[in-house]
C-alpha cells in the first residue's frame, strides 16, 4: 500500500482503533500521530473526521479530557461539513460525556437537551440521547426526571426496532 494514500490512511486507522480497543493507549496514539502526519489536503475528509472521532475516544480512555474534547469538537465540525448528521450527533454526545468527566454536568445537560429539541434524528439516536439524560439525572439523584427519560428511551428504541422491521419487509 502506497504511503499517504487513502488505503494507507485506512490501514493506519484500523491499527489505531485495534490498539484502542485493546486499551493500549500509547500504541493507539502513536498510530494516530502517524495518521495525522500522513493526511494531505487531498485525503478523504471522511477519514479525517473518523480520525478525530476515534482519537477522541483514545484520549478519553487515557483521561486526557481536554484533548478528547478538542478531537470530538473537530469531528463534529468535519462531519457537519460532510452532511453526516448522525455522526455529528454522536460527536456531540461524546463531547457531553467528556464534560461529565470534567464535572461540567450542566454543560453536558445542555448538549443533550439541545439534541432532543433541535434535531430530527432517527428513533435509535433519540433513544441514545434520552438514555444519556436518564443516566445523567440518575447520577444527580433526580430520579423522576431519570425515569421519564428512561421511559422515553425505551419508547424510542421500540420505535427504532419497528422501523428496522418495516425496512426488512
Image (cartoon, rainbow, N blue to C red):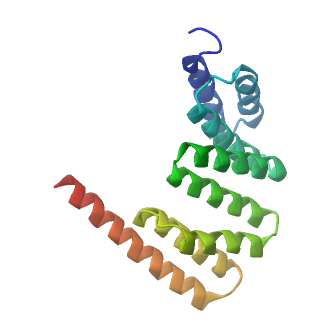
Q: Is residue 40 above or below residue 90?
A: above
Q: Is residue 142 above or below residue 48?
A: below
| Along the line of sight, the residue nearer the viewer: 127 or 26 | 127
Q: Is residue 6 above or below residue 58?
A: above
Instruction: Quarter of the image for the N terminus: give it.
Output: top right
Q: Residue at x 74, y 50 (%)?
A: 60
| Along the line of sight, the residue nearer the viewer: 122 or 150 | 122
Relative to 125, is 58 on the left or the right?
right
Spot occupied by residue 19 in the image (x, y as percentages of width and height): 65, 32
Q: Residue at x 54, y 18 (%)?
A: 7
Spot occupied by residue 47 in the image (x, y as percentages of width and height): 59, 32
Q: Residue at x 70, y 58 (%)?
A: 95
Instruction: Quarter of the image for the C terminus: give it.
Output: bottom left
Relative to 157, is 146 on the left or the right?
right
| Along the line of sight, the residue nearer the viewer: 147 or 78 | 78
Q: Is residue 17 above or below residue 102?
A: above
| Residue farthest left in this picture | 169
Spot occupied by residue 156 in the image (x, y as percentages of width and height): 41, 72
Q: Residue at x 48, y 68 (%)?
A: 126
| Residue farthest bottom in this picture | 144
Spot occupied by residue 120 in the image (x, y as percentages of width and height): 46, 67
Relative to 30, is 144 on the left or the right?
left
Rendered image quadrant of residue 98: bottom right
Q: How many marks?
A: 0
Amino acid at each position: 500500500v502506497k504511503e499517504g494514500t487513502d488505503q494507507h490512511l485506512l490501514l493506519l486507522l484500523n491499527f489505531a482503533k485495534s490498539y484502542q480497543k485493546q486499551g493500549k493507549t500509547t500504541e493507539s496514539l502513536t498510530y494516530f500521530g502517524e495518521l495525522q502526519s500522513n493526511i494531505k489536503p487531498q485525503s478523504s475528509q471522511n477519514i479525517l473526521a473518523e480520525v478525530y472521532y476515534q482519537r477522541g475516544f483514545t484520549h478519553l480512555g487515557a483521561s486526557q479530557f481536554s484533548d478528547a474534547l478538542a478531537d470530538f469538537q473537530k469531528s463534529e465540525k468535519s462531519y457537519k461539513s460532510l452532511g453526516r448528521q448522525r455522526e455529528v450527533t454522536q460527536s456531540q454526545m461524546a463531547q457531553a460525556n467528556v464534560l461529565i468527566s470534567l464535572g461540567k454536568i450542566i454543560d453536558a445537560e445542555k448538549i443533550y437537551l439541545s439534541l432532543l429539541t433541535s434535531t430530527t434524528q432517527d428513533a435509535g439516536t433519540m433513544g441514545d440521547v434520552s438514555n444519556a439524560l436518564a443516566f445523567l439525572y440518575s447520577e444527580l439523584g433526580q430520579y423522576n426526571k431519570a425515569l421519564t427519560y428512561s421511559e422515553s428511551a425505551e419508547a424510542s428504541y421500540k420505535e427504532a426496532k419497528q422501523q428496522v422491521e418495516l425496512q426488512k419487509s
